[in-house]
Image: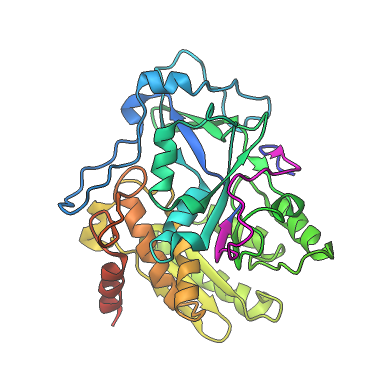
Amino acid sequence: MSPYISDKSKVHSSSADSTRRPPILASIGTVLIDAFECPVLAPKVKTLLCPSTTSQPAHILSQDEIQSTDLAQSSDCSPAVAISSDASTPQVALSGGALYALIGARMWLASNELCTLVDRAPRGTDVLPELEEDLNQFGSGMWAWNEAEGTRMTRARIRYDGDIRMYQHVVKPPHRTVSCLLDTPLAGAEYLHIGPPFSPEDLAEFLAELTQRADTEWRPRIPEPRGAPVLLLLSNVFSSEASLKLTIEKLVRHLIDDIGVGQHGDGVVVIRSGKLGACVATRLGGLEWFPAYFSGQLELRVMDVTGAGNAFLGGYVAGLVLSNADAYEAALYATVSASFVVEQIGLPIFSPAPTELWNGDQPTHRLRDLRSRLS
């Protein structure tokens, strides 16, 4: 097990509903509170030209509100450089891989088709109402609250020292096992998003446990263990320099044609490469590149890429669902989802009615625009 996640053998979900259909996409990633110890650099949502948008941006807490969250002391297993306690009072904002993955999918799918577990202490002593409201604006059913004594919402502390970003877990994300998921709304999900701090070894253990259990037929679509380390290596090695494009293509073709991805070699490899866009490859369909939505002169619209990768994944799953599992068409949906995340710091501004708008625009509009560029 990764040393950066805590062991939770049981989940007490307050949102369990026996009549609810299994979600299309579930995540055992994190929804967490980031505390920025340099308020000047903490997320400040960009003012967008959205005259029809009435909803408020993600909540940034005041000093009094921050003090009421009672951040715990960091543990010995915290993964980052130690952070001193003499920094300025932090500002906090919602973040996490599960949050951004579900938001990326939510742009295309209904909220009742998405779900993740969010830990918190009981009796409202852990998560401020304002933060819960920020989550619920996207659909309250997306968040299955895991409430129990000794359980708290995952928290991290972030500090900037010049160009160095120091990240430290204050409350570690829990370790989700198959056993603790079977009685939650996540059970039976068609797709399961698994991200850091889960390691490839954690994923292999999860899949092994799922296969060995005789009391469930749940087989969510998630990457195979042998492929995970390779994809992790690719994501860590490559930058977004155009000079690496041919190298990426060579390695992806080797992975698809020579090694094989998936049980019968019919799997998909998707590589996100920043401003280069995304590369999608299958053995039958070959390799194809898709540009980033904000490319060329539009790159000036990109403010912060935090969460873009997970939003891309969520959008990709939604695209698979809406395109009858077309691996290439799904990349268009994924690209659009990421575009709404990168044009401000923090979550996109969401307006639910009368027509859902994200940053004052409709995802379908951007999808048509992206298709027109490729035609």
Q: Nearer the viewer, residue 209 or 151?
A: 151
User: Is 20 one of the magenta-colored residues?
Assistant: yes
Quarter holding the N terminus is top right
Q: How is the image coloured?
A: rainbow
**Residue 174 vs residue 52: left or right?**
right
Residue 258 visible in rendering: yes
**What secondary structure characterizes most of the magenta part?**
loop
Q: Nearer the viewer, residue 350 or 169?
A: 350
> In this picture, is 110 found above or below 125?
below
Report the residue that reaches farthest toward the front.
19
Q: Residue at x 65, y 74 (%)?
A: 261
Quarter holding the C terminus is bottom left
Q: Residue at x 58, y 62 (%)?
A: 20
> In this picture, is 86 found above or below 110?
above
Q: Residue at x 66, y 78 (%)?
A: 258
Report the residue that reaches farthest toward the bottom.
284
Residue 167 visible in rendering: no
Q: Where residue 342 sits: x, y (%)?
A: 34, 51
Q: Where residue 141 sits: x, y (%)?
A: 50, 53
Q: Where residue 10 sits: x, y (%)?
A: 74, 43
**Residue 292 vs residue 20: left or right?**
left
> In this picture, is 170 found above or below 227?
above
**Residue 230 vs residue 289: left or right?**
right
User: Is 196 one of the magenta-colored residues?
Assistant: no
| Count of numbered tags | 0
Q: Where residue 89 sits: x, y (%)?
A: 40, 18
Q: Which residues are the magenta region?
A: 6-26
